Amino acid sequence: MVDVVGTNQTIIVVGGGISGMTAALEAAETGKQVILIEKRPYLGGRVSQLYKYFPKMCHPTCGQEVNQGRMKRNPNLRVITMAEVTDISGDTGNYSVSIKLAPRYVKDSCTACGDCEKAVTTEFDDEHNYGLSQRKGAYIANKMAYPQTYVLDPRMMGTEDATKAKEACKFDAIDLDMQEETIELTAGAVIWSTGWKPYDANKIQPYGYDRFKNVITNVEFERLMDPHGPTGGKLLRPSDGKEAKDVAFIQCAGSRDKNHLAHCSRICCMASLKQSNYVQEKYGHDGKSTVYYIDIRAIDRFEDFYQAVKDNNNISFIKSKVAKIEQDGDQNPVLHGVDTEGYKRYATSHDLVVLATGMEPSVDVSDFPVKLVVNPEGFIEQDDKNGGVFAAGCSSDALDVNRSVQHATASALRAVQVVNQVARSEVQ
């Protein structure tokens, strides 16, 4: 049983991505008691699945390491993973929060030695790599996973491999009898920071994501580049493992489209500009990128980054909404459309196509455990009707990492103000 207690001076943060971690840390460092709830077995969210940030082109592991260090040093912050909020009742300053805990089947005494992973042979699609590779049934999600504690896949329970994992553990850290639990916590304020998910590219039928292996999404492209990813950092085509030296990037894949996502997801242009540099990072002057775009939305200081990419002779821009993708006999995706600058029709083949899929909230409005005011796209609005429940980061809008962190800090301040008001009212 998880030993944790909340009061009306406690702030609960739901979601352990970059926004959730930021909100939790900022609130805890003011002296407030904070409980961070994360559905996955580890913290880090989508940022942990990136290869590099824009515009500095640095690796996310640096920021993750800093945040993890802050967490370990802060006695006011409690982290509970594999936990899902199922209900929130009450009112501002006095919420009752129901939390469902999924069994990890591994105790806190785990030393992350890896013997259980070596003992099992069962494999499943690797969620961290968006299903581009497989992982063992006993696993740690990634090198930077926090906490560094193994987890057993529940689909392995009752099998011979589960027994092998338990027998391989020298520290008796595996408990195959763990059961789902439910706990009730009290909180003065709740920060909803459940992040975003990529739009389902299967729904964009003309682009053939469901039919052509060499049509992938921007988040999958990030994993291909990562040294710890499915190809060990080699930019290879999923169909045949050949080097992808000629890569096309299709902007607004499902965004700004009344049939899919009506909103602009804000990050997609910058993500593709960043990723267009990846091709040359791997292949030098042999690497070629082509960006098919409606318009490029690089705002604020990102304009300089955009200009630098435009000045690169190995990166081309075609102003066009790609109409459809077909495939030739060599499994090369062939893009069809009209270049609106000159109105020339094209049918151009590339080694690989990357769809800049948009962002949508990771939790559907119908699945919220409490009624909140949301906009037509499903993002949570800043509204007094939401009481002491505040959105942070991409649960509030489509935001890049920088703006997500800023927004999370603001949400932490709002939550701190709520619990301070509760404390003052009790004294009076």
Image (cartoon, rainbow, N blue to C red):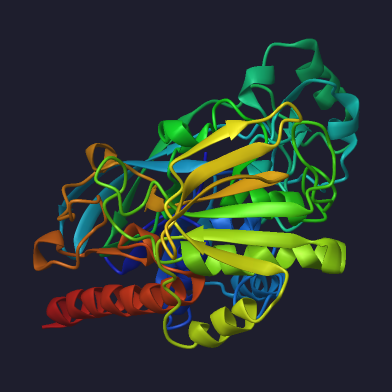
Query: Total number of numbered labels?
Result: 0
In the foreground, 37 or 361: 361
Residue 350 in the image, given as x and y percentages of width and height: 69, 46
Q: Quadrant of residue 299?
A: bottom left
In the foreground, 175 or 47: 47
Q: Residue at x 53, y 31 (%)?
A: 208
Judge whether 285 appears above or below 423 on screen: above
Q: Residue at x 68, y 43 (%)?
A: 129
Residue 72 in the image, given as x and y percentages of width and height: 65, 69
In the foreground, 246 or 196: 246
Image side of residue 283 versus residue 290, left or right: right
**Quadrant position of the C terminus in the picture:** bottom left
Image side of residue 159 versus residue 84, left or right: right
Residue 42 in view in this figure: no
Judge whether 127 appears above or below 387 on screen: above
Residue 17 in the image, given as x and y percentages of width and height: 51, 59
Residue 74 in the image, given as x and y percentages of width and height: 57, 75
Q: Quadrant of residue 313?
A: bottom right
Q: Quadrant of residue 154?
A: top right
Q: Residue at x 68, y 75 (%)?
A: 57
Q: Residue at x 59, y 69 (%)?
A: 273
Image side of residue 295 versus residue 284, left or right: left
Residue 379 in view in this figure: yes
| Residue extending farthest top | 159
Judge whether 106 appears above or below 339 on screen: above
